[in-house]
Amino acid sequence: MNNAEEATITARSMYAEELARLRKLHGWTLVELGDRCNYEQSYLHRLETGGRLGTLEAAQALDRVYGTGHVAKLWLLAKEEAKRSRYGGFAEVEADATSIQEFCVSTVPGLLQTKGYAKDQLRAAETASTEQQAAGVVARIKRQEILSGEKPIDYRSLIDESVLRRPTLDPGVWIEQLEKLIKAAQQPNIAIQVVPFRAGLYRLLPSSMKLLWLPTGRTVAYVESSWSGQLIEEFEEVEELRLSYDRLRDSALAPSESLDLLRSALEDHTSCLTPPSI
């Protein structure tokens, strides 16, 4: 094995290779294995090729069929490996996406932020040097090209109303940010929907969540908080997040109503800055 091959070894790849090795050792086809463990042939094939990590229950079922005890342990290692990877190739996945649906509970989505807002958010995080913050702003604005390039992606964002009620310390920065949201909401490839306070409580979600549709037809998710982030590729987990997103969208204002609320927020903010007439 050369150095390049060694560098690509992961717990996930080891798990997939071990599943393929065990089946060949027993001389079974995927159909025969499926009959023994009650999982579909296509599902088992994706486990063996690394296209899917699957569930712990599936790993335990394979342990029973093969009479082993290490398959589930390998699965746990692969799962932990995925959790440790903060950004896990997210930038590349986002760049390839043909459609993105996003939810933000406390901040303006990165793809819709102005430079001023992004700078304030990164400064408030207090997790990077001034130079790193500046680089982060540049990178964040650069990412927004996927919304306005030659082939702009379809983008839908759900924003909790609390985002609109928490302005930046600099009034000018907040005005610029609201104006950008209003302009973005009128673009044909962008839909912004506000989840109003009157919608009440909803299922707890990460502070930021993205669902990304890829050219291959696969959907992945990315969840992020102020201290961690994770790319999620497992079908079951992505489906659970997608269902949560769809339910939340049902309680959101329509795009036209959301645009009215954005305009109202801008009017309220600017009126507070205008000195009263004498």
Image: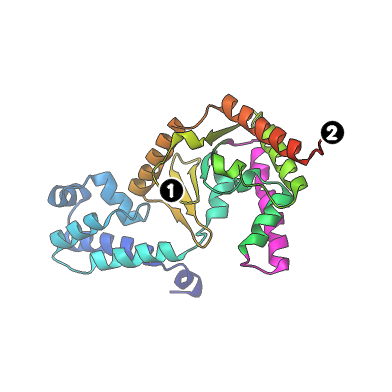
Q: What residue type is labelled 2?
A: Ser
Name, please, the residue furthest toward the front. Answer: 278
Relative to 139, does residue 258 appear above or below in the rendering?
above
Question: Which residue corresponds to mark 1?
Answer: 205
Identify the residue shown where x is 29% and y is 50%: 45
Q: Earlier in the sequence, mark 1 or mark 2?
A: 1
x, y percentage for residue 102? 52, 42
x, y percentage for residue 8? 46, 67
The mark tally for this picture is 2
On whether residue 145 falls in the magenta region, the answer is yes
On whether residue 136 falls in the magenta region, the answer is yes
Q: In which quarter of the image is the N terminus?
A: bottom left
What is the span of residues highlighted in magenta in the rendered image?
126-154
Classify residue 185 by image quadrant. top right
- The kind of secondary structure element at disc 2 is loop
Question: Which residue corresponds to mark 2?
Answer: 277
Identify the residue shown where x is 53% and y is 50%: 93
Q: Is residue 139 visible?
A: no
x, y percentage for residue 273? 77, 41
Compare residues 50 and 223 and report the one nearer the observer: 223
- The kind of secondary structure element at disc 1 is loop
In the shown orientation, is residue 119 left or right of residue 26?
A: right
Q: How is the structure coloured here?
A: rainbow
Task: State the mark number for residue 190.
Answer: none
Relative to 74, does residue 262 appear above or below in the rendering?
above
